[in-house]
Image: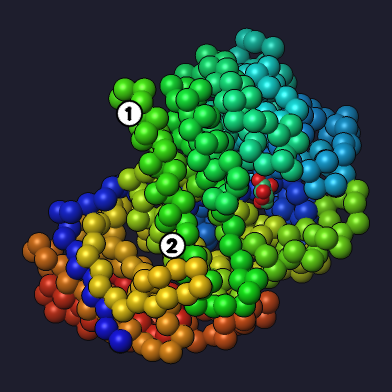
Amino acid sequence: MKGKLVLDTRARVAKIDPRIFGSFIEHMGRAVYTGIYQPDSPYADEDGFRKDVIELVKQLNVPIVRYPGGNFVSGYNWEDGIGPVADRPKRLDLAWRTVETNEFGLHEFMKWAKKVDTDVAMAVNLGTRGIDAARHLVEYCNFDKGTYYSDLRRKNGAEKPFNVKTWCLGNEMDGPWQIGHKTADEYGRLAEETAKAMKLVDENIELIACGSSALDMPTFGSWESTVLEHTYDQVDYLSLHRYYGNRDNDTPNYLAQSLDMDDFITGVLAICDSIKARKHSKKTINLSFDEWNVWYHSDQQTADNQPWQIAPHLLEDIYNFEDALLVGTLLITLLKHADRVKIACLAQLVNVIAPIMTDENGAAWMQSIFFPFMQAAQYGQGTVLTQIQDSPVYSTKQFDQVPYLESLGILNDDETELTIFAVNRSDQESLELDLTVTDGFVIDHQLLATEFTGYGIKETNENGQMKLQNNDNVTLSRETAQATLKPLSWNVIRLA
Ligand code: AHR
């Protein structure tokens, strides 16, 4: 099978906002407790953070982490997680029917984020709380000193402000499962007024309003319109959330789910821009795809769990090879929209639907999905190029015209290196990729050619056997390169 990718380094989609490789830590399951924080672990550092997890998070190159939820945030009092640990209350977390000890809170998270060298996207509670709690949290985090909340932060050990720039106005407020679930009008008004107050405390922050929690929500579309009618002038981004699963065990259809993500993004952009037109606004709302991943392997675990435990095993999906391939196509899809998708968060980061897993008594390990994410975040820096792609196609029960080839070209900032990400969705045939660069960019040598392939589609990485391999089947001439993309493979080719 043959495929073509034609690039012109003058034809550009957009510079990539590094925050497109963000992730997410929620107070749920074992994401925090025994995930990033486990003081009694042999891997713990002086602050109780797991060093093995810190190392893997650094390898993943995650530039921003959303915190503390998720559904959890809609019942959370941020004040419970500050001050002396002995004085912090134990609370019922109604979202996940768990006991939250609050041993880990805001200061601990900010310290951890600094250690892994990532920024924080902070979510405020617009379920059970509102304007006051949100504006106080901004003051606590970002105001220098001399006021009640800024001085409370200093008293609690952080002299300098945390300077959190990116803020989420609640979480999935369209979902009936959400604590404090609202209609679009109720949420839109609350988000508008909360945004105003938060920006009055710190005019430099950026705000994300909640879009739909999935493309198939019954209120999809009208929710976005109504929320933006209220919040357009106050917010900077609209959120999208979407999880995928291969419940019917239909791999060709599963690997085509990135087309669903593409539809979702295109649809939401159309709505954002229609509101812009209706308002005669000069401002453009961009997107924050701040929850995306595969989530379905752990469905039964969630159902079987007894309520009111501390840090139970929840949503611990063990990912297989086909999940990694899908994640590769989803990353390419997000990047194709780099002009409008500025933030995205792989949900989540540790133990809960995560690329990194821990064993309470043993070392952390990498799931299959770790590999494409790590490479995308490391090499997906620069400018996405407009492309002409030619590939044979197939049909599935959900999609027509699914290309076997999913590919993307990125030019680095000093315009000397070209990175290609490519997935071959075929389980039968190799794809002979013919890359042409049309504008005088001369291909001199290969910096890297790797493939992630050769595993059974249901194979997982619990034994640590998965690794990236070199792709020896790449040949170069001045303006072209040819590469063999093996059946079911994630590929990275870097040229200079
Ligand atoms: O990431 C797990 C959950 O999925 C989040 O708490 C929620 O926002 C979404 O429904």
- Could one spot residue 180 in this view of the protein? yes
Left or right: 384 as drawn, with respect to 469: left
- Could one spot residue 69 in this view of the protein? no
Considering the numbered disc 1 on the image, is that residue within a helix, a strand or a loop?
helix
Instruction: Kindly identify which residue carries mark 1.
Output: 277
Q: Position of residue 323 (x, y in %)?
A: 56, 71
Identify the image quadrant of the C terminus.
bottom left
Question: Is residue 417 positioned above or below 223 on the image?
Answer: below
Left or right: 284 as drawn, with respect to 326: left
Instruction: Kindly identify which residue carries mark 2.
Output: 259
Q: Position of residue 182 (x, y in %)?
A: 68, 31
Q: What residue is drawn where x is 26% and y is 50%?
A: 13
Residue 435 figure quarter: bottom left
Q: Position of residue 296 (x, y in %)?
A: 67, 65
Q: What residue is drawn where x is 68% and y is 77%?
A: 462
Q: Amino acid under label 2?
A: Leu
Q: What residue is drawn where x is 19% and y is 68%?
A: 6
Residue 394 figure quarter: bottom left
Question: Is residue 131 positioned above or below 463 on the image?
Answer: above
Q: Amino acid under label 1?
A: Ala
Disc 2 beta carbon < 8 A from ligand 1? no
The number of numbered discs placed on residues in the rendered structure image is: 2
Mark 1 neighbour class, 10 Å CA radius: few under 14, some 14 to 19, many 20 or more: few
Left or right: 105 as drawn, with respect to 492: right
Left or right: 270 as drawn, with respect to 368: left
Question: Is residue 4 positioned above or below 83 on the image?
Answer: below
Instruction: Work out whether residue 139 or residue 428 is closer to the camera in this orientation and state it.
Output: 428
Residue 55 figure quarter: bottom right
What distance separates the C-alpha of mark 2 from that of mark 1? 27 Å
